[in-house]
Amino acid sequence: MAMNASSGLIVSPDRSVVRRRRLPVSGEVLVTEGATVRAEDIVARAMLEGPLLPVPVAGLLGCEPAGVARLLTVTEGMAVREGDVLGRSLGIWRFGAREARAPMAGTVERVSPTTGQITLRGASRALEVRAHLPGVVSAVSPGEGADIICRAAQVQGVFGIGGETRGILSTEALPGAVWLLRTADGDDLRRAADAGVAAVVAGGIGYADLGVVHSRRSPVVVVLTEGFGDQPMADRTWNILRVHLGRAAAVDGTTQIRAGVVRPDVVIPRSGEGRPLPSGPPPELRLGIRVRIVREPGLGRCGRVLQLPPLPRTVDSGVVTRVVLVALDGGGVQTVPRANVEVES
Amino acid sequence: MKPFLITDCGSTTTKALLIGGDRPQEAHLVASGEAPTTVEAPYADVTVGVLAAIAALEEACGLHLRVPAGTRPDAAAADYLSTSSAGGGLQMLVAGVVGRFSAASAERAALAAGAIVQRTFSVEDGLDAHERIAELRRLRPDMALLAGGTDGGGVTHVAEMAELLRAAAPEQRFGGGMRLPVVFAGNTAARPAVVSVLGDRCDLRLVDNVRPDLERERLNPARDAIHELFMDHVMARAPGYDRLSAWVAAPVLPTPAAVGVTVRAVAERLGRDVLAVDIGGATTDVFSVTSGRYHRSVGANFGMSYSATQVLREAGAGALARWLPLRMGDREISDRIANKMVRPTTVPATPVDLLLEQALAREALRLALAHHRRTLPPAAPQAGRRRLGDSLAGRRAGAECPVGGLSVFGLILGSGGVLSHAPRRAQAAMMLLDAFEPVGVVRLGVDSVFMLPHLGVLRGRCAEAADAAFWRDCLVPLGTAVAPAGSASALSILLHLAGGTQRLTVPRGGLVRVPLVAGEVVRADLAPGRGGDLGAGPGRPVRSELHGGMVGLLFDCRGRPLPAPERPAQMAAWLAAAGAWP
């Protein structure tokens, strides 16, 4: 039994990438199965109900909540423009007369005799989901969205910041580019923000340096392939990405570590190669398979599985755990907790 | 006694335990088994993981506990019970009128019921009405608890909060077009208004006010209503729970609620106040029973992996560095902690990584306890009575001079991997001592394999069996800590051992461990130096019984509040004295 080891992050020069493009609420799907789409095409759209805004009319008119109804100039269901009078109190001989006006355009949804509030609902707005990748619509989920499939090089990162973006893969900080670096630091992030770079893809960066992104409210998407600290991008990852310099890349910095893990990724579609490749389950930890060590000691080193001892062992920290013996690239054998290796995929 | 088969469906793992014995008083852990929880896709059925965990248990003990087809637990073989926090547990939003009164009480009621409180709203929460509505919509809770106003007081603000809830019409987490369960536990005079606003939109339950007046808090009716709705609505709709609910011999309890049942029972049995903590990857739950009253809080951002960087942000790298017996720069600390966050299932393989994780645990526990203190119920109004929370808040009835934070606790019980599975038990004891800074005479223990929830739900069926299994198999006694309150002072000790007496003196600022195995109890005369207080007053001696454990007796004269170690060598010396390092 090869338990405990994580199935590794995807680092592949050529695979079929499927993206589920879904609306968060029910809506209309604009594409059909088998259709070819560009990355910027809208695949689904939903109309969201407008925002709600309670207006304290009783307070504005200086009356009891129960008395609001007789002072209103609007009724439930009526459309109003911003600034329209909702209700009016005349005061005594017009002394102290007051008006309550609509703070936004919308529809009167509810009048409450208990609190003297009017609830206004603003205009509805469109929510659109784009394809993000150029490819073929492989499935349609009515009312929800579609799946897009394409042949691409794909590199998953371990951590990312920001959402989806696209740009030309480059080793320079160019406006709108996806900037590829072995390692990055705070100065690189500042340069990226100043130059209007779309995304930074690097091996590692100091955790403290991420403050640059937050402090500048920078829209730069960041994807780290290795982790935090001085960790250069693994040679294999670097080489897969480098051969695509000058081509369009789709980057998604979305990261969720908890249940339903989501890792960020960089996808470089291979134009003209739409035929899907067969895909299987992620590889399991077994003798001979390649793994990467993801925690000290030996963080970032790669090698092949030499032994999988069935019984737990005590490692240097004193922790008793099941281990794997790894024949490291470049020589040497290291005993590593199974939880601390990822299978290369 | 018919055995009990009990599962806890956790967020990642479902653990099955078999509790057996000839008589309830002899109940003990027979075997355990675990499997991944299957509440999410691709299984989307919690019972798949439950049956897999039971299968693993069967393999371990050689018994048949499922029906021959393997499709359900066999009621003839064992009574089946379960707790659950799978799929995020019970997620609630809470609304009140005033943040520190009704909203705080409502939040405590939800927490006591074992809920995860997604957000607490009040009229003074700083949000505009439209922002509240947007947030209410985003949350998708399982249930809402609405409170506000004292009985007979004003109605308007409560009705406003009800209208916000109606306007937002938050969708339930498991959807299905069902009406959102709402418990109203506010001003009884506002019930007609609340019913008129929410009655046709929500499944509304009206219960006694959590805050009938400013001086009193009454949480049980709201807590009971939440449990009832949890079974009827949440459990009924979570994937696979309709089957699970049909299998169990007693209602499924939310995991934290079941832990609370166990903690309260232990406090009752000891006749002492008890503090328990469960430190996980994302959150740290703190449970306390003080003067018979129970309080639970959730340190939502204090955990060992998913929330590790939030602990780092809150405490600062320097705060972690002080607990290390070696030098490490702030950048290295933050990078290592962040790497743990992004790869949460990795284990520390080097001594340095282990020490850093244990430093992180100290800070997570410290922050969680501070949060627990902040959320304590209000003090009881009666003059002269000890105020609830005094033991946590560092107050003693009728005394201006505090004796320290946790003097009245008889037991501090730790749970969670970093404590229960520390390579050395002394490391767990030191984490509890450094983080909680208990004073006086306090027993320390850890949960062996996270049995606290199982024993909580078992208590509802057979309290004697739950008791027996707790003391026999759940509690791993670490020993007893003796720590004078006040600035560091020396401590003279006379131990009355079976073979005679042993006298020792712990110098001011020192920490000394005396081995005493689990099950042994010694009488001790303890005389703190000037300024040191073991509960009888500064410098006054006390006589106490000290219980042994895996670590033994820890005489801690480092002072309270605990001074931060000035240099790594000092921390190394403390750890070495306790047997936790090197």
Image (cartoon, helix red, strand yellow):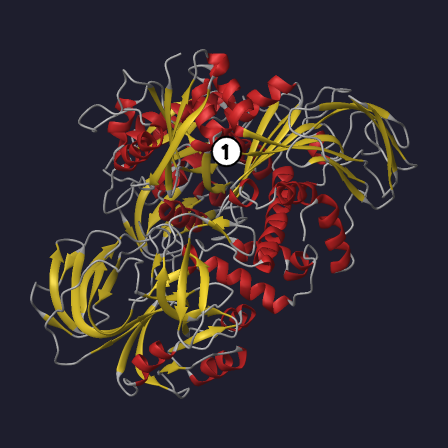
Q: Is B158 rendered above or below residue A133?
A: above
SS class, disc 1? helix
Near mark 1 (Cα within 10 A), the count class, few <14, some 14-19 or many ≥20, is many
Total marks shown come to 1
The image shows residue B117, relative to residue B190, as above or below, that is below
Chain of the residue displaying label 1: B
Q: Specify whether A227 is left or right of A21.
A: right
Side (left or right) of B214 relative to B523: left
Q: Position of residue A308 (x, y in %)?
A: 36, 56
Which residue is the site of mark 1? B111
> Would you identify the image quadrant in which residue A155 lies?
bottom left
B31, B234: nearer the viewer: B31
Residue A120 to residue B474: above or below: below
Q: Identify which residue is drawn at 82% across, 45% down.
A: B510
Q: Position of residue A331 (x, y in %)?
A: 43, 75
Q: Which residue is located at x 66 percent, y 18 percent?
A: B271
Q: Amino acid at mark 1?
A: Leu
Q: Position of residue B407 (x, y in %)?
A: 74, 31
Q: Nearer the viewer, residue B266 or B568?
A: B568
Residue at the far right: name it.
B530
Q: Quadrant of the C terminus of chain A?
A: bottom left
Q: Is residue A154 above or below residue B194?
A: below
Residue A17 appears in the figure: yes
Q: Name the spot of residue A187 as percent of width and height, x first.
A: 53, 81
Residue at x-position 21% and y-position 72% = A133
Could you say which quadrant of the image residue B172 lies in? Answer: top left
Q: Nearer the viewer, residue B372 or B125?
A: B372
